[in-house]
Image: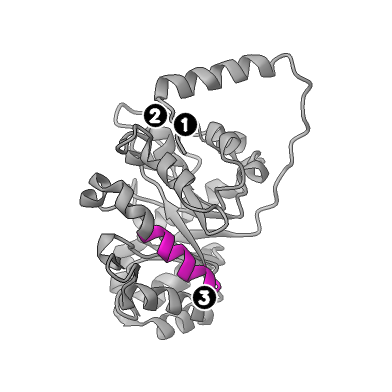
Amino acid sequence: MTNSFSRRNFLKTSTIAAAGAAFMPRIPLDIPTVQHLGIQLWSVREDMKKDTAGTLKALAKMGYKEVEGFGYSDGKMFGISFKEFVNMLRDNGLTMPSSHVMFDSKAYDAGTKSLTDAAKKSIDDAASAAQQYIVCPYMADPDRLIIDKMIPVYQAAAEYAQKAGVRFGYHNHDFEFDKKGPDGRLIIEWLLHEIDPKLMTFEMDIYWVKFAKYNPLDWFKIYPGRWELCHAKDMAATDKRESIEVGDGVIDFNEIFRQSKTAGLKYYIIELENYVTTPIQGAERSIQGFNKLKF
């Protein structure tokens, strides 16, 4: 498919649509109910390394019921067996519906047109923990130069995941909304168009979409139902526009989340990358800020 947007055309289209909307009857909003609110454990990564069990206990005490994992490698997470880690989550009343696992060009054998055994094992382990999703956290720098060759990698991962009972997803940063592939389409467009929507979903990192100077709502409208997960972190009102705790910045999460049904959004995941105080304090402030949202 060749449905290419430049930022200029995309924003122009959005402006025209917005102008037209002023003359259309107001459509009642579908106010979503948040059933799945979690935290990406990358937010408290140093604490997890020092005291895994204690950190999970602290997150549960704050009110978190779900976490999103990261750092899976060869059947282990945070230095312990994957099964032991899952049991630790359960001991603290936590579940892990999704986790970030890297799927780069090395995870795929072009000769056999299949995933490597290590990549398959990561999906099998996710399925054993009853995860709903396994999410590729980003596209490695070298792979961004061979985007067309990455499509088979993600396609193979998505197909294998589906057979295992897990949904494969991709998490964006800002570069997917800036860098283009060989035919001029943005990387995010490549991924949205070239892989069967029935096989692959997306985890929209709202902060990074805003950082790239796009409006998440526009992407919800153009690609409805494709964004089943999201990362929520706020943007500081500074020249650097660094990420901060939810509720302390300039992102209008109420406006965005009122369109959750259009987006297909089911899982809301808090993430922290910068810290005003400490990661643990930031995690607590973030869930408090999220719970104050009115959508």
Q: Are marks 2 and 1 in contact (CB under 8 Å)?
A: yes
Eye-nearest disc, 3 or 2: 3
Q: Residues within 10 Å of mark 1 (few under 14, many from 20)?
A: some
Q: Secondary structure at mark 2?
A: loop
Would you name the residue on which mark 1 appears?
250
Is 218 left or right of 142, judged from the image as shown?
Answer: right
For the point 45% across and 47% down, the residue is 194
For marks 3 and 2 on the same chain, the one whose residue lies earlier in the sequence: 3
Determine the main secondary structure of the stretch shown in magenta.
helix
Tell me if residue 254 is in the magenta stretch. no
Give the magenta-colored segment's residue range.
Answer: 153-166
For the point 33% across and 37% down, the residue is 242
- The CA span between labels 3 and 1 is 40 Å
For marks 3 and 1 on the same chain, the one whose residue lies earlier in the sequence: 3
Would you name the residue on which mark 2 appears?
237
- The CA span between labels 2 and 1 is 6 Å
